[in-house]
Amino acid sequence: MRLYSVNIAVLNYNGRQLLDECMPSILEATAAYPGRCTVTVIDNKSTDGSVEFLKKKFGKKISVFSASENRVLISYNEYVKTVVEEIVIILDNDMKLDRGFVLPLIRYFERPDTFFVSPKHLSFDGKEYQGGKNKIVEKPGFISAGPFYRGYERETDISSRNLFTGNGAFRASIFNELGGFDPLFLPGGMEDTDICVRAWKAGYCGYYEPKSALYHKGSATFKKEFSNFRRFVNNYRNSFLFAWKNISGMETAKNLLLLPFTFLVFLLTFRYLHIAGLCSAVSGARMIKKQDKRSIKRSFTEVKKITSKKTYLPVFDPKKITGELSIVIPAYNRKKDLLALLDSLLKQKYDREKVEIIVSDDGSTDGTGDALKPLMKRHKELKYVYQKNAGPSAARNNGIRVAAGRIIGLLDSDVIADKNLIRSVLSEFSGKIDVLEGTTLSFERDIKNTAFTHSVQNKTGGRWITCNLFILNEKIHGVGGFDEEFRHPIREDTALGFSLLESGAVSKFSKKVVVYHPVYRSDYKMLFKLAFYGIYEPMLIRKYPGYYFKYLNWIDSWFFPSYYSGYYAMPFFVMAWLLTGRTVFAYAAAALYAASYVISVYAVFRNKKVLLRDILTVGFHYIYIPYLRLYWIIVGIFKF
């Protein structure tokens, strides 16, 4: 790894006591970095003797840059133009650092498009998480950004892409290219979000690295200079200005149309600070300078999508690749099936130094981990990772993070691998392909094909079924792995497929790479599961609208089966009957409902063995299952 030259720049205004408390840890972190690292304090016209104190106590260990005037964070613009180091780490005067703070941040700059890397922010005593990983949160006509979004707790210790940071490592050349922090946001707030979003829009990237930690007292200087009222009004003002500056096109039109509604909501809910901030923003809007369109490579919507995706994979490190193939198997309370799969894999002939098999346990309670211990002693290529139950997407990502193979193989714990699977993968995965989709065949375990039979097959490709899928390690990192918002075993593979298509991945289907998927006997609970899974359809549409309607037949059993039309039309005819009193509408409603009922029950039993018990079960549940599915789809629309 290249050791970039680094300058740690500490902004100070009347913070003599804070510097005395924090500077020793900063100097320790500087000394621990194996490359060139210097420390500079940017003094914003302090009057408490800070400069004299620094020179007396720390001497030549640090340098002091005196800003021409106190412009808060905008003083960094003046300073960064003068630095000769490639990377500038921006800190406040009330921050302490871990000794190993610098190096984990610097490794990301191996990628030429990296603009910033944010460390993990903790309270000064290290007990509370304060941020570092940030996302956009949109509300009608109003945008906020920060670290406390829904589900943030699960992301605080995982390396990932990041929307913005105020304190962390920045590439100095890009900082200057972007013009630094925008004075529009003085005295402070959202200027750090703004420059990072501008960088994302210009085609650069930012990351979050929790292995680097800083300890922050939190606005220690800012609180002394400004009242709570002014700080809150300023924050709301800058949120509006940020939105108006960075969104464009239809986003701008939507935002402006919602402004009266936003104002009314603020008024009715007595949010007078918000109203004051909005009024201040309107008066300051004339100072907005839009980003040069020639430099924009991504829209604000694209930036939000990239940085809000629940991606838990670290930046791809080619030096970590030491083998050819890493097979990742998520497991949750399927010990017996898992052992059968491992038996079909471990007895195959392959180079044990180049192939690894990773079992990613999703919080199993059936003794899965204990059952693997004797196998791991005999087979060094077999590895095991564990996490609390969080769903198959998170389990697969957990396995992918530790994978060291050039190719990531995805198998489900209940399949059986063909005796030549590993050899076939390595021979078929050649040429300029990113994804290899294998054949999935079903086999029966003395189970007849009934209404409650569950089978999986893939004989033609294009389905992205993750029980038999192989992807370049670099490519799956590039799309951020599996989207963990899909917490159940439904649509997570489709979402991955769409993200790979979106990235331009080249795929190939192979009839030589084969797994066998068992046929399961289910029960009436399956109908409830299928109804509940409707909650994920709106999310998939929102994330990949073009791909959803292009590659999926959405008028099918997943979203809106055509034979459900009668169910959904019936309430309108009942309403017409009640309003007009004409019985023709009542007869029409009954006919529509009956037609849909008969067709949907027939569809369930078509080409399947008919059992009286199943007829009674399906017949009863299809009285309300379509409405239950519609309910979950509506929930998904509002939730996602």
Image (tube, rainbow, N blue to C red):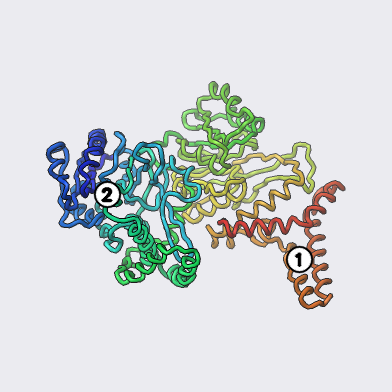
Residue under label 2: 221
Residue appearing at x 27%, y 46% in the figure: 91
State whether residue 529 is above or below residue 583: above
Q: Quadrant of residue 61?
A: top left
The kind of residue tagged 2 is Thr
Residue appearing at x 35%, y 36% in the figure: 125
* Residue 417 in view, yes or no: no
Number of residue marks: 2
* Residue 84 in view, yes or no: yes
Residue appearing at x 78%, y 63% in the figure: 596
The kind of residue tagged 1 is Gly
Q: Where, quadrant-wise, is the N terminus in this rendering?
A: top left
Badge 1 element: helix
Residue under label 1: 566
Horizontal relation, residue 200 to residue 310: left or right? left
Closer-to-camera residue (621/146): 146
